[in-house]
Amino acid sequence: MSKKILYVVHRYAPFPGGSENYVRDMAEETLSRGIEVWVFAGEHKGNLNGVRVTKDPLILMRKWDLIVVHGGDVAVQDFVLSNAKRFTSPMLLMLIVPSESEVYQKAMQAVKYIGCSTKEDWEFVEDKDLSSKSVQLRHGINEKSSFGKPGFREKYGIRTKYMFLSCGGYWPNKAMHELVELFNKVARDDITLVLTGYDNRHNIIPKESKFVKPLMIDSRDDVMSAISEADLYIMHSHREGFGLVLLESMLNKTVWAARNIAGARLMSKFGFTYDTDDQLLGYMRSFNGVTQNQAEDAFEYVTSNHLIRNTVDDILKLTLEAPSAWKCVDSKQALAGMKRSWRSSILQIVPTWLFLVYFSIKSRNS
């Protein structure tokens, strides 16, 4: 019998976004290994490339070798995490951004595994005295879709010698407005700062000027083209998960600068990390390109450690335990009594099914 993996994310590709594309890459890589794969997503456009996608929460009651939850502090993931004790399949919480929220804290107690990838992750889990649940999770990128093709500069009219780039959804944590203010102090006429976003529902796009070009781009191909043609990628975010865009930059041999957080802190020898705005300002003012050796070393590191196959390798290691290593509440188990009485078994099963049936009906009508 093939293994069965369920991924959980708030929104699934082809919707644009980092999480949407990342979970798609994990799901498709897992599927390519002969494993049955489903995705539980609040927003989606149906099955994609052989991966079955649903927003029906009853899918959570099936027997899975592993349920993989992509982060938290988002409605769909929080729904699953807040009910983690109700679902008897083993669960992995990918610790995208450590959170002190009540849901996150309770979920960390309930799940079987907590996936850590950055120094902040490991420190956070250790501080909560949950190191026994922590497992290594190497975040990775899809090398096939992360190589950019030339053409961005010509398409969008970038004529300066150097192009600096920062991508995201113009969310406040990306600090793009702050980056523009800082860049305006650089005072060089041979650099254009390009900003790209795909979603502006709650945010204001920075103002365009002669050397600042904010864009709204849904096309992943255009974003990858921009990364491949940029001379410097800047991740000015106040908080990040890992920062997969740094891996994409390194794969395209584009140098990066980033606050000393998350993946940047882990990979500091392959880019420029800073703790203050003045440090970044000085780096931008003196920027004169990237050396070939620096780009090659970064490329070698990514292709050896941070491709999507590395991520899925780490996930599938957790499914090597025999099925008997975890429990599933069903009628046979209730009849056998196991370690619970009839009354306690029924009290656990009935509320769970009523709860999920309610949300199943609600999701179908939404």
Image: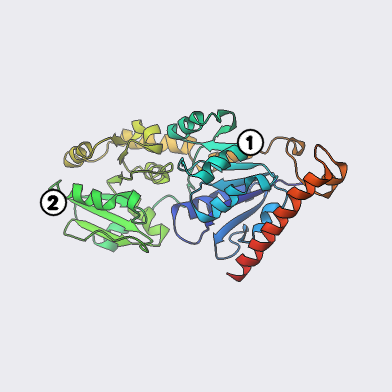
Foreground residue, 341 or 268? 341
Q: Is disc 1 in contact with disc 2, using a CB cutoff of under 8 Å? A: no
Q: Secondary structure at mark 2?
A: loop
Asked whether residue 267 is in view, the answer is no
| The furthest residue to the bottom | 365
In the picture shown, does residue 4 fall above or below 304? below
For the residues labelled 1 and 2, the Cα–Cα distance comes to 52 Å
The amino acid beneath tag 1 is Lys
Image point (48%, 61%), residue name: 15
Q: Quadrant of residue 280?
A: top left
Q: In the depicted view, which residue is nearer to us: 196 or 141?
A: 196
Colour setting: rainbow
**How far across and down, in percent of the image, does residue 188 sit?**
13, 48
Residue 17 showing in the rendered view = yes
Disc marking residue 327: none
Q: Is residue 365 left or right of residue 233?
A: right
Dot 2: few (<14), some (14–19), or many (≥20) neighbours within 10 Å? few
- Relative placement, left or right, of 179 versus 267 is left
Q: Indicate which disc, 1 or 2, sits on the residue closer to the N terminus.
A: 2
Residue 145 image point, x, y percent: 46, 52
For mark 1, what is the residue?
A: 317
| Residue at 63% over, 43% down | 91
SS at mark 1 in the image:
helix
